[in-house]
Amino acid sequence: MSKGPEAFRTISEASEEVGVAQHVLRFWETRFPFIRPMKRAGGRRFYRPRDIATMKTLRRLLHDEGKSIAEVQSLYRAKRQPAANVIDAPQVDAPRRPQTARGLEAALAGLESAKSRLDRLLMHR
């Protein structure tokens, strides 16, 4: 059974999709603060689709373009933005601030809906 595009990936699945060994993904976590997979009981890592996209770009920069770890870190620090901006991975727009109580209620409903979707995704693992 194949996972959907929005499903979280284990480290072995992420490794295969990104095209680097599992130990490389673990190493990148120690060098790049923008790589932070979710960790469950026992320390199992789960990568979001955005994490995969970021790591694919990171692989391209390091392996294909030959940039050094220091160059990518420097790029990240220089921009002072989320890593996705620095290395061209997709970025989620920041939510707008609600101006009214009705806006707050709508924002809360949106957050509750997102939480429900994430809960369902995690339960199907």
Image: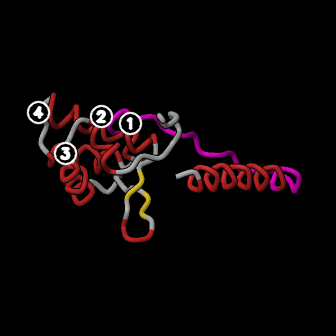
Q: Which residue is mark 3?
A: 21
85 to 27, vertically: above or below: above
Colouring style:
secondary structure
Mark 1: which secondary structure?
Answer: helix
Q: Earlier in the sequence, mark 1 or mark 3?
A: 3
Q: Which residue is mark 1?
A: 53
- What's the residue type where badge 4 is placed? Gly
Q: Amino acid at mark 3?
A: Ala
| Helix, strand or loop status at disc 4 | loop
Instruction: Please give left or right for residue 93 compared with residue 64 in the image.
Output: right
Q: Which mark is residue 66?
A: 4
Label 2 with label 1: CB-CB less than 8 Å: yes
What residue appears at the point 15 percent right and 29 percent down from the top-left corner? Answer: 65
Q: Which residues are magenta?
A: 86-104
Tell me what residue is drawn at x 25 percent, y 43 percent.
Answer: 75
In the image: residue 115, left or right of residue 55: right
Q: Which mark is residue 5?
A: none
Among all residues in the image, which is located at the extreme top? Answer: 64
Q: CA distance from mark 4 to mark 1?
A: 18 Å
Residue in the foreground of this view, choosing between 97 and 2: 2
Compared with 84, 98 (above or below) is: below
Residue at the right extreme of this rendering: 102
Q: Amino acid at mark 1?
A: Ala
Residue beneath disc 2: 57
Q: Earlier in the sequence, mark 4 or mark 1?
A: 1
Please report whichever mark, 3 or 2, sits nearer to the chain's N-terminal start. Answer: 3
The question of residue 96 being in magenta is answered with: yes
Q: Position of residue 68 (x, y in %)?
A: 12, 42
- The earlier-in-sequence mark between 3 and 4 is 3
